[in-house]
């Protein structure tokens, strides 16, 4: 067994033991979900850190920031896939 696979197995064991002891998974992960870009609360803190904007305006800004973030990720993904496809075609000698 390589050092990497052993570390991976140990981490998996630790994670499974931790979740085996957890009765309320939702509560256990609430803090991290709030800090995730998938959470509107994350974006509210980004666009309105001092809380000075009216709530409705802050929500609109946060939604736009969140949409821009995920569209940026999608664009990066499409570009990476295209580059990978192009590299595979070049390696295979396929001119198309």
Image (cartoon, rainbow, N blue to C red):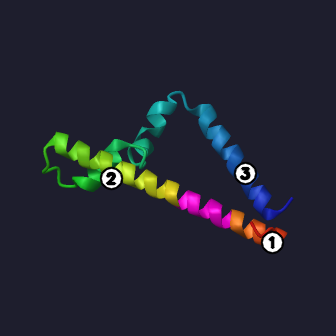
CA gap between label 1 and label 3 equals: 38 Å
Q: Secondary structure at mark 3?
A: helix
Which label's residue is closer to the chain start, 1 or 3?
A: 3
Q: Secondary structure at mark 2?
A: helix
The disc at residue 10 is 3
Label the magenta part by its dominant secondary structure: helix
22 shown above or below 40: above
Mark 2 touching mark 3, by CB under 8 A? no
What's the residue at 53%, 61% (across, down)? 76
The disc at residue 65 is 2
53 shown above or below 91: above
Residue 20: percent from left, percent from top: 63, 32
24 shown above or below 2: above
Question: Magenta segment range?
Answer: 76-84
CA gap between label 1 and label 2 equals: 39 Å
10 shown above or below 96: above
């Amino acid at each position: 067994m390589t050092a990497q696979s052993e570390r991976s197995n140990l981490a998996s064991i630790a994670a499974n033991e931790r979740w085996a002891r957890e009765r309320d998974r939702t509560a256990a992960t609430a803090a991290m979900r709030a800090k995730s870009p998938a959470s509107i609360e994350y974006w509210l803190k980004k666009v309105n850190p001092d809380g000075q904007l009216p709530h409705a305006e802050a929500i609109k800004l946060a939604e736009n920031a969140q949409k821009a973030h995920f569209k940026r990720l999608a664009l990066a993904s499409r570009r990476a896939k295209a580059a990978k496809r192009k590299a595979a075609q070049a390696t295979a000698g396929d001119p198309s």
